[in-house]
Image (spheres, rainbow, N blue to C red):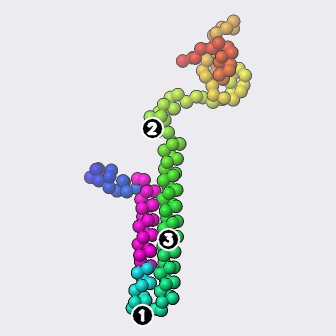
Amino acid sequence: MTEFRKRGLIGLFRHIGQKVKGLAAAICVIGILGAISTGVSLYLTGVLELIPCIAIGLGGVVTSWLSAWVLYCIGDTHVKVERLESKLIPKPAYAEYLAGNAPERGACEICGRTTDLIPAKIEDQMGVRYRKVCRECFAANNATEAN
C-alpha cells in the first residue's frame, strides 16, 4: 500500500505543471476536432444552413484554442515557480548547515555598526575580552575567533 501512495496518488500531484500543460494540449485538440465535427454534422443532417455551421465550427475552434491557451499558461507558470522554488529554498542538508553556521547579525560592540558579527577573543593591554565584532574591528584588534 505504501508503494501505491508513493507513486500513485501522491505522484499525481508532483510536477503538476507539466500535467496541466499536457491536459491543455489534449483539451485543445479534442475541442478543435469536436467543433469541426459538430459544424459538419449539423450541416450534413440539414439542421442548419452552411453559414451558421461554419460559424459554429470556427467559434468552437477559437474558443477551444483560447481556453487551452489560458490553461497552458497556468501550467507553464507553475513549472517556472517550481524551478524558482528549487533554486531559492535551501535543500535540507544545506539548511542544517546554515542552522549551525549562520552568522549572527547585530551591532558591533566596538564600532556600533550593524552587520554580521564574529565572536572574538581580543587580547591587549586591557587583558582578555570576549566581544561580538564586525570583520573590520576583528582585523583591526588582531582578534582570534572565540569558541
Please tell me which of labels 3 and 1 falls first in the chain: 1
Q: CA distance from mark 3 to mark 1?
A: 27 Å
Q: What residue type is disc 2 on?
A: Pro
Residue at 43 percent across and 89 percent down: it is: 43
Task: Give the residue pinned by disc 2.
Answer: 92
**Contact (CB < 8 A) between labels 2 and 3?**
no
Which of the pair 53/139 is nearer the observer?
A: 53
Q: Position of residue 71 (x, y in %)?
A: 49, 64
Decide if residue 109 is on the left or right side of residue 34: right
Residue at 44 percent across and 65 percent down: it is: 25
In magenta stretch: residue 125:
no
Q: Position of residue 137 (x, y in %)?
A: 68, 19
Which of the pair 3/59 is nearer the observer?
A: 59
Which mark is in front, 2 or 1? 1
Q: Main secondary structure of the magenta part?
A: helix
Residue bounds of the magenta highlight = 14-35
Q: Looking at the rendering, in which quadrant would you find the C terminus?
A: top right
Q: Position of residue 31 (x, y in %)?
A: 44, 74
Residue 46 tag number:
1
